[in-house]
């Protein structure tokens, strides 16, 4: 259920707070009360709220200062502030509006007017929140592969570059697995592209369910996928890749043409590595390992070659 619309009442006058609370409760709003600017700073930072009815003359600070702090915080950009004041000077109103207040009401005020202004503020807050959610959806669509719902190639490249730089800076491990569905062209040729799409979606779901929250799974292109694993040594990445290979081999894929079986070939690379100095070289190393896996008979995991013969470089079924 959606969180109820919550209005913060910030005023040192207890009588005004009680009356405003009463009218707001009757109108169906939740309320949050503060008596000083300092108390409001803490409460509005830690508790959920949507609109603030803020007294201009608080005992410890000018309400305009608090309004400016609130609206300067990116987290509160979609909040609405109505300033209350006992002064009807135009200069005060202009200053308040320029420094963060969205609306201004002069004391003494009529409660029907306050409620009308709150309803208008709520409409603006609702529209802003809808816009924020729409932008989030658009951003997610821009970085997501439409068919598999994994991250797309461009986003993967950006995140790999960022993670590689971080790995290089702090000398922390970073591993990459490039995964290719074996003989996928045969699936398309035999059953059609609609069934091929079902296979891609099902395999992608297995990736999503298997990775850690810190990992990143992406559709690299066609029937190829990439899984980036921060803070993961090569041996652990090989173990993960073998787990994925075995899972896909043992999991029937339901399609409109009946259950199908699939296998994958996987190439794994990792840094720090003495011969890898750029993010794209991590991909090249994993691609070379994938090529060896396919050349070696498919349905297996191969890792980058290292000069140290004691390191594990191959896991094959």
Image: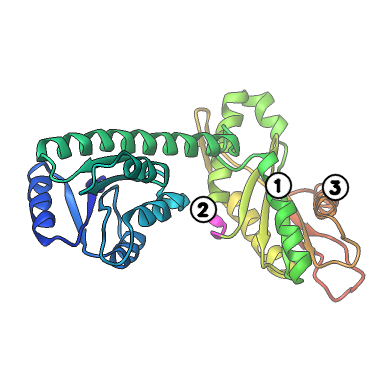
| Left or right: 7 as drawn, with respect to 310 | left
Of 78 and 72, nearer the camera is 72
Q: Residue 60 occupies which quadrant of the picture?
A: bottom left
Q: Which residue is mark 2?
A: 209
Name the spot of residue 294 as percent of width and height, x first. Answer: 81, 47
Query: Badge 1, how many Cα within 10 Å: few under 14, some, many 20+?
Result: few
Q: What's the distance in space between the residues labelled 2 and 1, CA to CA?
A: 23 Å
Residues shaded magenta: 209-213
Q: Which residue is mark 3?
A: 295
Q: Is residue 108 left or right of residue 189?
A: left
- Asked which secondary structure carries label 1, the reply is helix
Q: How many marks?
A: 3
Left of 286 or right of it: where is 260? left
Q: Earlier in the sequence, mark 3 or mark 1?
A: 1
- Mark 3 is surrounded, within 10 Å at the Cα level, by few (under 14), some (14 to 19) or many (20 or more) other residues, namely few
Which of the 4 image quadrants contains residue 261?
top right
């Amino acid at each position: 259920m959606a969180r109820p619309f919550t209005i913060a009442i910030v005023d040192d006058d207890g009588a005004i707070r009680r009356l405003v609370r009463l009218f707001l409760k009757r109108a169906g709003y939740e309320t949050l009360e503060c008596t000083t600017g300092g108390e409001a700073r803490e409460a509005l930072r830690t508790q959920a709220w949507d609109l603030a009815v803020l007294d201009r003359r608080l005992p410890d600070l000018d309400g305009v200062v608090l309004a400016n702090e609130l609206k300067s915080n990116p987290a509160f950009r979609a909040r609405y502030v109505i300033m209350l004041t006992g002064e009807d000077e135009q200069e005060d109103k202009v200053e308040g509006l320029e420094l963060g207040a969205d609306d201004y009401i002069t004391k003494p005020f009529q409660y029907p007017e306050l409620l009308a202004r709150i309803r208008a503020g709520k409409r603006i807050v609702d529209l802003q929140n809808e816009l924020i959610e729409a932008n989030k959806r658009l951003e997610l669509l821009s970085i997501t592969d439409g068919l598999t719902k994994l991250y797309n190639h461009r986003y993967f490249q950006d995140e790999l570059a960022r993670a590689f730089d971080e790995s290089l800076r702090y000398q922390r491990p970073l591993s990459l697995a490039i995964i290719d569905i074996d003989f996928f062209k045969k699936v398309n040729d035999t059953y059609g592209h609609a069934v091929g799409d079902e296979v891609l979606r099902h395999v992608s779901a297995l990736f999503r369910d298997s990775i850690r929250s810190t990992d990143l799974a992406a559709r690299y292109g066609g029937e190829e996928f990439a899984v980036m694993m921060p803070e993961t040594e090569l041996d652990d990445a090989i173990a993960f890749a073998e787990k994925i290979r075995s899972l896909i081999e043992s999991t029937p894929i339901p399609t409109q043409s009946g259950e199908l079986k699939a296998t994958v070939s996987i190439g794994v690379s990792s840094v720090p590595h003495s011969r890898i100095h750029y993010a794209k070289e991590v991909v090249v190393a994993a691609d070379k390992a994938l090529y060896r896996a396919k050349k070696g008979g498919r349905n297996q995991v191969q890792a980058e070659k290292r000069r140290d013969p004691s390191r594990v470089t191959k896991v094959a079924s």
